Amino acid sequence: MTSAGRDVVERPADVEGAAPAQQPAPGKPERRLIWLLGPAFVAAIAYVDPGNVAANLTAGSSYGYLLVWVLVVANVMAVLIQYLSAKLGLVTGKSLPQLLGDRLPRAGRLAYWVQAEVVAAATDLAEVIGGAIALQILFGVPLLLGGLIVGVISTILLVVQSRGGQRPFEFVIMGLLAVIATGFVAGLLVSPVSPGDVIGGLVPRFEGTETVLLAAGMLGATVMPHAIYLHSGLARDRHGLSESVARTGRLLRATRWDVVIALVIAGSVNIAMLLLAAASLRGVDGTDTIQGAHAAITASLGPVIGAIFGIGLLASGLASTSVGCYAGSTIMGGLLRLRVPLLVRRVVTLIPALIVLAIGFDPTRALVLSQVLLSIGIPFALIPLVVYTNSRVLMGPFVNRRVVSVLAWVVTALIVLLNLALIVLTLLG
């Protein structure tokens, strides 16, 4: 990096437990662009977790194609947001939680950590419950036992990350993402979709409070706070802090491709879920639950499609709960400067989900409500992200351009307004 760039861009603090940055050896040329991809695919798992399944199936089965526009807009927002998060980590060498922890007083750090942990808990709740539902659908496993099984398998995935490094973990997550995409898109191959209705669903509109609630849930399931916190750490851990402007620029170009490819896949899966529900489940009794939706899919599209759907849901739960636990560790390490072993954290965060399953609370409703809570938590991650990436002191020559800055603030304002509307309408009944 130029001397001016070194003067303005902060140096990273040592991060205990962070994966070693994979920088090229001195004199060795950078690998091809494709080998720089990967971090965004891990973050993208947050966009196809079981909370998405619940919110999208509910929206499609209850309101048809009405809320297609929400997913399209949310995915476009997500591309911008995840790129800014990765950019922050690459340029500063610090994760978003680390930067917050450096700048907030002790009381502020604790308060910020509490709300971030609530969001992380809601995330884990959705993911474990979703995996448990998938095991019940596929093998008739009781929900509580299914939750325990999901916890054990996700722990094994975390061991891959902690012992094998980030790259093997990325390959595992990419494989699960492929299974997820197959599971949720397969139904469209045998289910007729109305092109005219899909186009009509691109027109922004609501039909009552419940559609606003669903839209907030879909937004929370698409633009997820823990993914915003996590992506900056993933980029930092994979690539480290570059010492040259040229290499940083190359990494940012690779990151743009990484984010666009990963989120186009995730966005397509989300839209496919809603279209499948709108085309095949509209007006069918019992489709307000994932189990009911699976039964309806099996009845109308056949047992093979039903089984593929269940496998996709299981892969979603396993991958997303591992990534969510990884994100929680990044948040705690940055804000509290504490490092709790991932396996210990996995056990602790599993408890709330198991309690919900044990008391018999409607799992699909729990999934949808968890996504609304995530939506409310988005501004707390998004506002500082935009502020920091607009700071020349932090970003140096890679500070946001004016058009990016304007778009980022518009996205932030839209999300905050949607959440305010959700709260007001909910309080008014």
Image (cartoon, rainbow, N blue to C red):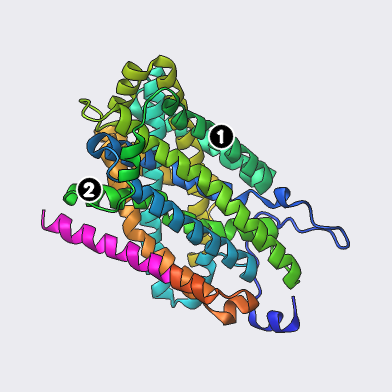
Q: Examine the rendered structure and indicate whether residue 332 appears above or below residue 298.
A: below
Q: Nearer the viewer, residue 231 or 408?
A: 408
Residue at figure coordinates x 48%, y 68% from the top left: 385
Find residue 43 and report its horizontal and vertical position in percent: 53, 50
Q: Residues within 10 Å of mark 1 (few under 14, many from 20)?
A: few
Q: Which residues are magenta?
A: 408-429
**Magenta segment: does it hold 255?**
no
- Secondary structure of the residue carrying numbered label 1: helix
Q: Is residue 42 above or below residue 391?
A: above
Q: Secondary structure at mark 2?
A: helix
Q: Label 2 is placed on what type of residue?
A: Thr
Mark closest to the chain's N terminus, 1 or 2: 1
The foreground one among 160 and 298 is 298
What residue is shown with label 2? Answer: 211
Q: Where residue 48 sits: x, y (%)?
A: 45, 42
Which residue is denoted by mark 1 in the rendering? 178
Q: Position of residue 407 (x, y in %)?
A: 44, 68
Work out whether residue 206 can be spotted: yes
Of the 4 image quadrants, the one containing the N terminus is bottom right
Q: Main secondary structure of the magenta part?
A: helix
Q: Amino acid at mark 1?
A: Ala
